[in-house]
Image (cartoon, helix red, strand yellow):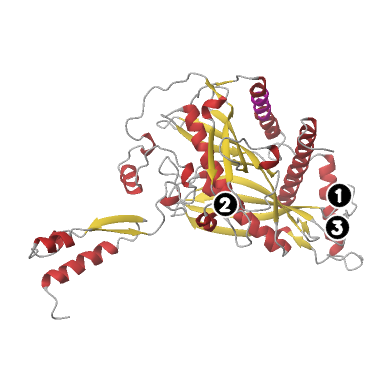
Amino acid sequence: MSCRSASTRRALSSISSISSISSFSSFSFPLAASCYSTPRSPRAASSLVTTRHFHGTPARSTDGVFHGLTDSRSRLPWIEAFRRQQEGKNVALGDGMPRERDLTPKKMSDSYHRVVLPLGRDPSLSDTYINSSGHIRLGTVFMDLDALSGIIVYKHTGPGLTTVTAALDRITIAHPLTEICDLEYSGQVTYASGRSSMEITCKVARARDEGEPSRPEDVLLTCTFTMVALDPATKRPTNVPRLLCSTAQEEAIFKAGEAKALAKREMAKTSLLETEPNDPESALIHNIWLRQLAYHDPSDTHRQPANVIAMAKTVLSTASIMQPQYRNRHQTMIFGGFHLKQTFELAFCAAASFAHARPTFISADPCTFRNPVPVGSVLYLTATVVYTDPPLLDADGTEPAQKDSATPLTRLHVRVDSKVRDVEHGHAKPTGQFNYTFSVPRDVRVLPHTYQEFMMYIDARRRVQAGDAQDRRERVRQVEEGNLTE
């Protein structure tokens, strides 16, 4: 050690001090000659002036999203966004954004976007998209779809505003994949009245040869996002270009989007936050309460079966700090697709823990993003199994049985409540409620006890019934169009 020169010791000291800056996920620095004593030869100087790169995470525009879903808009490095934020500047405004935007009406085809995920041709993607059992990781696909909707909405609105994910409509698996293959992501704006909100419909299908359109039997799933445009300076909703319909088919799609927007407003009026349970629901609550009393009455023959589990025992919770690598295009908020992926995977874990069996995804029911999740905040997620089908009791007090007791199958409805706090835990905001339905090959039932649990139970029951009605209507429509046979 004593034989080291003073210049070498200074060099090692400078490298050590730089490596201690561990908060950067990716950075580089030159080992310049100034860190050393004067080089003795040009060759020595050239060997010292090199650049070393240290990477803690992959260099992606939105971490974990397929690279084909990152658009061409330049992204500010996090350290620059952080500095601007500390200086009190509006980071979302960026540089050179136009003050006036073009609100000329646009066609559906103007926003159409298609990307092929080469899952079958590129085995390296399996680390991200294939789970431990060899199936598609749906949470990652959901994250990709949110990124796709961001590209589509930007093509419709143009630059100069901020767009955020406000809601996600129901997602169902149309045709499950039986093999790993290339997937086609596609979508377009399907409803925009000219106000701030827009409906974006996305589709995931088995990819066919270039130029060959996908067929109805190729479609894995479809989903609809509701995006809202905000003025980056005021954070208030702002108008967007109105959508033009060029064909009768587009007119029908537009009217369907308009009907869904009206239905959402009507559904909000009948929410349990606005009205009490109706008569059949009140009767069901009373019957379940009586069954609880019977389970604990020594003189009653009813005893709580082993497959009936208290709702409070189904809860799973997580807390995680939101790092810059998961931020969205607007620099200081977390990407909505990452948020969605986290809730889905926690719901899957809660369903598996409850049933002691591997769940199969059925649907993601309508959910809302109530508040953004800032970078650096702590995200709390709580998953609860709130409903099972067959349920513990029907409204008339009878106990529904499995269709086939030898091969039972139960649907589980899992609710994930999300909230965010700052690191100091001084302020908390709800960020959304997410609802997922799975099936498990077991006969299990959930039992609510408190009034809050009963309300969650009734809300989930309504969602399941609404989803079943929607599935029946969709099947009738497909039969009428000749896509299915009776």
The residue tagged with tag 3: helix, strand or loop?
helix
| Residue 334 screen position, x and y as percent | 47, 46
- What residue would you read off at disc 2? 120
- What residue would you read off at disc 1? 394
| Amino acid type, label 2 | Gly
Q: Residue at x 42, y 49 (%)?
A: 60
Q: Residues within 10 Å of mark 3 (few under 14, many from 20)?
A: some
* Disc nearer the start of the sequence (2/3): 2
| Amino acid type, label 1 | Asp
| Residue 402 screen position, x and y as percent | 86, 56
| Amino acid type, label 3 | Arg
User: Closer to the observer: label 2 or label 3?
Assistant: 2
**Quarter that holds the N terminus:** bottom left
Up-down relation of residue 5 to residue 420 (above or below): below
**Region of the chain picked out in magenta, as a range:** 252-260
Whether tag 2 and tag 3 are in contact, CB under 8 A, the answer is no
Q: Is residue 237 visible?
A: no
What numbered label is drawn on residue 291? 3
362 in magenta: no
Up-down relation of residue 410 to residue 470 (above or below): below
Q: Residue at x 41, y 57 (%)?
A: 57
Q: Residues within 10 Å of mark 2 (few under 14, many from 20)?
A: some
User: Closer to the observer: label 1 or label 3?
Assistant: 1
Q: Is residue 257 visible?
A: yes
